[in-house]
Amino acid sequence: MIEDAPIAAAPFELASVSGGVVSLGDLTAAGSAVVLFVTEECPTCAMTLRRLSRTAQELAEAGIQVAAVFEDPLEVAARTARRAGFRATVLSEPAPYEVSAAYELQSVPTTLLVNSAGNVARRVIGWDRDRLDELIEEAWAPSAGSPPRVVADDPPRKPGCAAKSTYDAETLAALDGAGSYDELEEMFERGWSDGLPVIPPTPERVQAMLGAREASTSLGQVPPAMGEATLQRLAACAVLAGCRPEYFPVVIAAAVAALEPAFNLNAQAVTTQPAGQLVILNGPARETLGLNASIGALGPGNRANLTIGRALRLMVSLTGGGYPGRMDRATLGHPGKIGFCLAEDERVSPWEPLHVERGFEPDQSVVTLIACDAPMSISDHRSLTPEELTRVLGWAAAATWSPNWWPLGGTSLFVICPEHAALFGEAGWSKQRVREEMFEAVQRPAHKLRWGETTPQVQAAPEFEAIKKWDSPDDIVLVVAGGEAGRYSAVFGPCLGLQAEIVSKEVA
C-alpha cells in the first residue's frame, strides 16, 4: 500500500546505536531522508532490512540519509541491524512509542520518504517491491545516474506486523521485556561461542573467576593466530564455558600444558585431522572439584568435566583463532573438540595413576594433555583371561588412524573400564605387562597390509615379515575410568605427523 498525499512529518529525537541522539532535522538537513520503522519480532521487517541494506548504502553514498527506527531497545536494534547487514543510521524508540503513534503507524515495516520541506512525500506499508522502487526513485531524483533498485527476485508483496504503538496498555505490559537485550544471542553475534550457548563474561564474572590473580599475567601466545593468553582472557573463556571459579586452577594448568612447544598446538589447530585435546585430571583435585570418573565419564551430565575441557577449547578458538572454517581446517573434527576432559578413577584402578607414571607424587593434582581422535568403544564381555582381553583391546585399536597404517607411529590412549581393569588386577598384571602383551599380540605379515594407505616400512619389508601396530609398548597409554558395570573400554586414535607430545602440568 502507498500513500502519496504530503503531510507534515512529526519531529523526533531518538537515541542512536552509534551514541547520542539523532533528530528528524539532522536527517533532512541536506535533503530528503528515507525513514524505515521496524521491530525485531517481525519477519517482514527482517526481510526488508536485509533487502534494503545494499540500497541504503547506495542512497547514503548519494547523500540521501537513511534511518531505521526500531520499536525496540538500543541493544536489540543494534543486534538486529548487524544481522541484516544494515549499516545506515539505526535509532531506537522506547515505549510507549509516541513517534510511531505520531506517524499513525498501523503496521511495520513502514517506509517513509521525508523531503527537505519536512513533509512525508511517500509512505509504503509492509513490503511492496514496486512501491519501494518508486520511493527510492523519487528520493534519488536530484542525484545523477540511475537509482538503485530493489532485488528483482524478492516477493512482490508481503504484509507486515502490527506496530507496537497500536497495542493497548495491557498488551504492552505483557510484552514488557520480551524484546529486551538478550545476552545469549549477543554472544552468538559477537562470535564468542563454539556453537552452543555461553555465559556472558561480564566484568563481575571474570573477576570472580580470576580471584586474586593478576589479570594481565600472560601464559604466552595461543596459536595459530598468536593471540595473547592473559589470565583475564583465559578467565573470560572459563566464564563463557560455564566453569565455576574453583575449576580455574585446572583450566590454567591445561592452558599452560597446551602452550608448551612440545605439545605443538599450532599444528593441531590448523590440520585437516580431527585433532582434539583431551584433558586428563589426576590427584586430589578430581574429587574436590567433583569430576566424574565413573558412569558416563566421557559423556554428558557433569559440569566440571564438560566446562573445563570447553574452556580450553574456547581459548584455542577465540584467542588462538582455531575456529572451524577459518584457521581450523579439520575435515570432520569430532565432538571432543567442543570440550574433552576426563578424570582417572584412581580408587578402582589396580595400577599406579597416570600422573605417578609421569613422575609426579600421588598427592599432587596434575593435568595431562593428549592430542587425540574421538574415542572408539570396545566391547568385551567374554574374555576370561588377561591374555584374551589384551588381544581384544589391541586388535580393536588395529584399525585406528587407518587399517593398514602399521606401525602407527604415535600414541594410543586406552581408557580401561573397571571390570576390564579388575581382570588384569586379579591376574597380577602390571600396566607394563598389559602394554607388552598387547604390543606382541597385534602383528600382521607385511603382504596383508599392502593395500590402501600403508607405511614405507610395510612397503619395504619382506612379504611375510611380521609388522606390529606400534613402534614400542610405550606408545600404549592406559588409564582407568567408567562405570563399574559393563565391559566397555575405549581407545583414542592418535594425531600423526604433528610431533604432539603428551604434556603434564601440576595444578597450582
Image: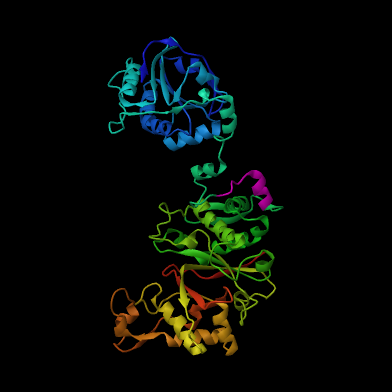
Task: State which quadrant residue 169 falls in.
Answer: top right
Q: Is residue 207 magenta?
A: yes
Report the front residue among 127 and 396. 127
Q: Is residue 377 left or right of residue 293?
A: left
Reply above or below: 295 against 104. below
Which residue is located at x 51 percent, y 66 percent?
263
Residue at (41, 77) in percent of width and height: 408
Location of the C terminus by quadrant is bottom right
| Position of residue 188 measured from the top left corner of the image (x, y, whole percent) | 50, 45
Asked which quadrant contains residue 430, the reply is: bottom right
Q: Nearer the viewer, residue 136 or 411?
A: 136
Q: Tell me if residue 253 can be seen.
A: yes
Instruction: Tally the numbered discs.
Output: 0
Position of residue 439 in the picture relative to residue 140 (left or right): right
The residue furthest right is 212
Residue 256 position (above or below residue 22):
below
Report the side of 7 relative to 343 (left or right).
left
Instruction: Look at the image and tell me whether residue 471 can be seen.
Output: no
Provide residue 236's location: percent of width, then percent of height: 60, 50
Q: Is residue 113 above or below residue 436?
A: above
Is 59 colored magenta in this rendering? no
Scheme by which the image is coloured: rainbow
Which segment is the magenta one? 198-209
- Residue at (42, 81) in percent of width and height: 395
Instruction: Pinpoint residue 416: horizontal percent, then vertical percent.
Output: 54, 77
User: Where in the figure is residue 100, as x and y percent of width and height?
Assistant: 50, 20
Q: Quadrant of the N terminus?
A: top left
